[in-house]
Image (cartoon, rainbow, N blue to C red):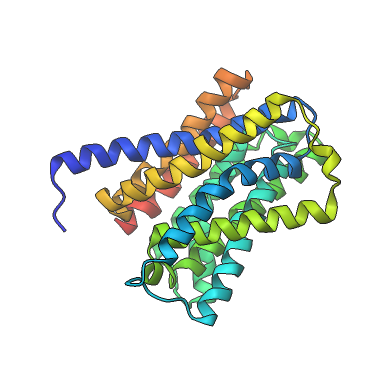
Amino acid sequence: MKINLSNKRLGALLAVTGIIMFSAKAIMVKLGYRYEVDALTLLLLRMIFALPFYLFISVREAKRTQHYQLTRKDFFSVIGLGTVGYYLASYFDFYGLQFISASLERLILFIYPTLVIVISSFALNKKPTKIQVYAIMITYLGIFIAFADDLKIENDGFWNGAISIFLSAFTYAVYLVGSGTLIPKLGSIRFTAYAMTVSCFMVILHYSIINSYEVLNQPWEVYALGFLMAIASTVVPSFLISEAIKRLGASNFAIYGSLGPISTILLAIIFLGERIDNYQIIGTIVVIFGVSIINLKKA
């Protein structure tokens, strides 16, 4: 499909806006922890506020009879992917942010395209090209450089956070690989609404088993942050990015992905007062370069 100039400009604006809004999520989580709220409670508030929007979209999309009808296999696949991709990935992310900075969190999450390649090579027997292998090596070299200063300090909390964020990136990569067969059938908006609805209910179930609802007696600021995360860093950017991909194409959109770590770093400096050292600056540049090679290869 031919994309005219106005579509490209609007698509670029939507892409940049959506990526920045997604990046702000880590900032809000770190601000929430200042009120001594636990990770699961903060995640629950985000999902509860987002659930009505995704339920509405799910019901609306399900009523459109011209759409592809889910089979039993598709139904269980959506449940599995929604559980892995948004429930587990979000929980690992929120938990890890208790121990590491928002800047490092975004940098670790940004390696998910490399994990997609690795998982695809095992699950789908798609062997990576030499360029992709070199890109993966460059990306992890960048991570090592960014952590160079932290490696000098024995900090159990830091490693708990780093491993947890890596698991978040890994589970999200699993979700992306698994969604490859369902998105062409259901469409990106319908699939995302279904998967997010499953994720919301899984978080509610998890909270019901682990925590007492008395813990929800939180300051109004925590509820405000939960609402902002749900709307400004979940629902709205998910549709902005869907529309951006529609106008630009997935390959062209991928080129904008490097804005994620950069915007998070800038927001963390402004709102959290985080400091970024030379190792993190160099590591971030190297990681962005490595992931960009993969994205440009796709394009």
- Residue 245: x, y in percent? 32, 51
- Among the 4 quarters of the image, the one containing residue 183: bottom left
> x and y percent of residue 111 in the render?
53, 50
Whether residue 103 appears in this view of the structure is: no
Of 212 and 272, which appears nearest the observer?
Answer: 212
- 66 vs 283, left or right, is left
The quadrant of the rendering that contains the N terminus is bottom left
For this orientation, the residue located farthest to the bottom is 72
Image position of 262 with respect to 57: above or below: above
Classify residue 103 by image quadrant.
Answer: top right
Quarter in which the C terminus is drawn = bottom left
- Residue 266 shown left or right of residue 32 in the figure: left
Tell me if I can see residue 179 in this picture. yes
Q: Where is residue 222 in the image (x, y as percent from the top left)?
A: 70, 29
**Most foreground residue, 220 or 122:** 220
Q: How many labels does the image show?
A: 0
Q: Tell me: 166 left or right of 283.
A: right
In the rendered image, residue 11, in percent from the top left (x then y), is placed at: 27, 42
Q: Which residue is drawn at 76% across and 56% down?
A: 206
Relative placement, left or right, of 204 versus 252 is right
- Residue toward you, 56 or 265: 56
Q: In this view, does 179 lie above or below 45?
A: below
Looking at the image, which is closer to me, 176 or 294? 176
